[in-house]
Image: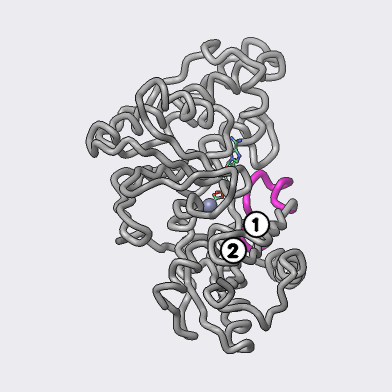
Amino acid sequence: MKNQENFILAIESSCDDTSAAVLCNKKVLSNVVATQEIHQKYGGVVPELASRAHQQNIVPVVHQALAQANIDKKQLSAIAFTRGPGLMGSLLVGASFAKSLSLGLAIPLIEVNHMQAHILAHFIEDREQESPDFPFLAMTISGGHTQIVLVKSYFEMEIIGETLDDAVGEAFDKSAKLLGLPYPGGPLIDKYAKLGNEKAFEFPKPKVDGLNFSFSGLKTSILYFIQKKTKENSEFVTENLADICASIQFTILEILMDKLKLAVKQTGVKRIAIGGGVAANSGIRSRLANAEEEFGWKTYIPKFEYCTDNAAMIGIVGHFKFLEKDFAEQNIAAKARYKLSS
Ligand code: KG4
Ligand code: ZN
């Protein structure tokens, strides 16, 4: 029904992607992402450069999102933005822009937790994806986070496991850097892994109790392994790239799957949803797809464009908060550390 439609403009600027989306209720009308290429030559995100690039991108990206959605800004019901967690300089650009626009248009402002958004991305209405029933387990795997969350409702979420050091995306990116691959190396490891033997080399799995993760030891063992092998043969990495990538990816996937199995055992919840940039990994996608038959789980894998950082996922949280009239004040501050809480 026309009068129940709400149009949310969502803005995401927590790291190195500037994104804007327009949603009509739970449907995505547009989802524009400007990826910042500048960081590639530094082998990682440079916060000051990210902030500057967001300032350059935000106006054209928002214009494009409105144009693609065929929506005039006067039709908007509210503006949702990523409040955190993320890089402060990056968050400030999105937050300031969202505040000014909501003030200028005299429409509500909605603040969104980026991690909640990765989880609720599963509720975007799309023919190609199904939404999980509550409760479910969400494993959020990205460049900044690695968490297992027990999701009881749209707004009740309990972190039951998280990384004690590096995020899984960092493990991918740092391993790739050791192999001389450009940033972000995760997708490249995925690409080469498809051509290699995952059992070619063995890397140790960390021993961490319970549902927590640790990835810093893996990075160190890969470093020592490469140093040792290149001493024996300076062409070792080039000659064995596919096998090394496949073996690294295998180890990381084993770590993730072991913890998921334990989480299912502890909670009795067999609905598993993944989110975050690493959820784009073809290995984890096929492991989870197979887990339906292998372990009797029901798994939810979001569409590729809703895995990596995007504003559509911010918009879906915006939609649910809009229905609750959960609006933010104009003096709200961005939050670099913003814990996901119930
Ligand atoms: O969620 P995201 O876009 O940004 C953060 O909030 O961190 O995640 C980015 C991370 C990077 O570490 C990137 O290397 C990783 O996701 N990534 C992948 C793949 N695609 C993106 N890692 C492994 N395989 C992939 N196909
Ligand atoms: Zn993210």
Question: How far is disc 2 from disc 1 in space, using C-alphas?
Answer: 8 Å
In the picture, measured across the screen, residue 119 lies left or right of residue 225, that is: left
Report which quarter residue 64 is drawn in.
bottom right
Residue 12 is marked as 2
Query: Mark 2: few, some, or many residues within 10 Å (few <14, many ≥20)?
Result: many
Instruction: Inspect this view and state whether residue 179 appears.
Output: yes
In the picture, measured across the screen, residue 30 lies left or right of residue 113, that is: right
| Element under disc 2 | strand
Query: Mark 1: few, some, or many residues within 10 Å (few <14, many ≥20)?
Result: many
Q: Which residue is mark 1?
A: 17
For the residue pair 38 and 325, the one nearer the viewer reads as 325
Q: Position of residue 92 (x, y in %)?
A: 57, 72
Instruction: Inspect this view and state whether residue 220 appears.
Output: no
Please name the amino acid that badge 1 sits on.
Asp
Ligand 1 is within 8 Å of the C-beta of the residue at disc 1: yes
| Element under disc 1 | strand
**Residue 229 sits above or below residue 40 on the image:** above
Q: Position of residue 131 (x, y in %)?
A: 46, 47
| The C terminus: image quadrant | bottom left
Q: Which numbered disc, 2 or 1, marks the residue that appears first in the sequence?
A: 2
Q: Are marks 2 and 1 in contact (CB under 8 Å)?
A: yes
Asked if the stretch drawn in magenta spans residue 214, the answer is no
- Please name the residue shown 41% across and 46% down the image: 132
Range shown magenta: 38-48
Tell how many labels.
2
For the residue pair 77 and 47, the one nearer the viewer reads as 77
Asked if the stretch drawn in magenta spans residue 47, the answer is yes
Report which quarter residue 244 is drawn in.
top right
